Image (cartoon, rainbow, N blue to C red):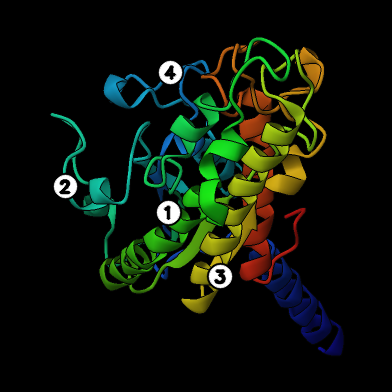
Amino acid sequence: MKHSVRTTLAAALAVGALLLALPAASAAGDPVTYVAMGDSFASAPLVTPVDPGNPACLRSLVDYPHVTAEALGARLTDVSCSGATVEDFASPQTIGTPAQYSALKPDTDIVSLTIGGNDTGLVAVALGCTNVLPEPLGTSCAEKNTLGGTDAVAARIDAWAPKFAAALDEIHRRASQAKVFVVAGGSYIRPGGCFPTQPVWGRDATYLQGEIDHLAATIRQTAQSHGDTFVSATPPTAGHDSCAAPADRYIEGFVPTSPAAPLHPNAKGSAAVGAALTAAVRQAQGLSHAA
């Protein structure tokens, strides 16, 4: 009898350990429901294979939300869309592209989002930093955007922060049970640049990455003030920026060398960011990263 009790107890403990090693699921045993929101950093435009469900968004089937969903065994609703701003969370971005908020439900378990690059004009700033010829034959974007001692780009980022905070409030209102993970940052170009491999002067490369880092820091502070988890895309892409050898790049340069949009993650970059998000989700759930 004692042996039987011990055997039964051991079996129960083994089952309990197995359950703890699995991603969290609903009481009904359904898979985790995961909604991915955001812009082109999330949707990974031009990375193949392309999601045929909404061609206008240029969404990849191997973007970081898909990588994370597969690792977690989650049921994914990916509404990330190239060119999105926070305004597109509340209203249709294009015909046939519903407002991103509409994907959120009371029973949503996980939400991830990347946003801000389009809202603050960072893409346009990056394009304005290009110079085909070496100094002084051109215009410095760092000098242009800091005339008079005020950093116009940083000021724009700071002014946008309340809109991002309001978006997080709305996400929590619509998906009150969800854990929210905010992904931002990324190693786009190393300090000092790599002119002429990437057509950005050294001081402008340092300035451009500094503005990307400032946006990420602003997003981090806002997310954490809402009790949300910030996931930095900078460590997983470090050393794999647009100055790296083409085979080592996770974020493409101004002229991509693998399927991806300029200044966006390629398939390797999306996989690396997806792995970082997966680890953050598992840590938030109190699970092993290797589960």
The foreground one among 75 and 171 is 171
Q: CA gap, disc 2 to disc 4?
A: 24 Å
Which of the 4 image quarters holds residue 191? top right
Q: If you read the primary sequence from the N terminus, does the residue marked by circle 2 or circle 1 appear first?
A: 2
Residue that carries the numbered disc 1 in the rendered image: 156
Q: Which mark is residue 91?
A: 2
Q: CA gap, disc 1 to disc 4?
A: 33 Å
The mark closer to the camera, 1 or 4, is: 1
Q: Which mark is residue 50?
A: 4
Q: CA gap, disc 2 to disc 1?
A: 23 Å
Amino acid marked by disc 1: Arg
Amino acid marked by disc 4: Val
Which of the 4 image quarters holds residue 175? bottom left
Residue depicted at 51% across the width and 24% down the height: 127
Q: Mark 2 near mark 1, Cβ–Cβ under 8 Å? A: no
Residue 271's spot in the image, x, y percent?
Answer: 65, 34
The mark closer to the camera, 2 or 4, is: 2
Residue that carries the numbered disc 3 in the rendered image: 221
**Residue 239 falls left or right of residue 53:** right
Residue 159's spot in the image, x, y percent?
Answer: 39, 62
Q: If you read the primary sequence from the N terminus, does the residue marked by circle 3 or circle 2 appear first?
A: 2
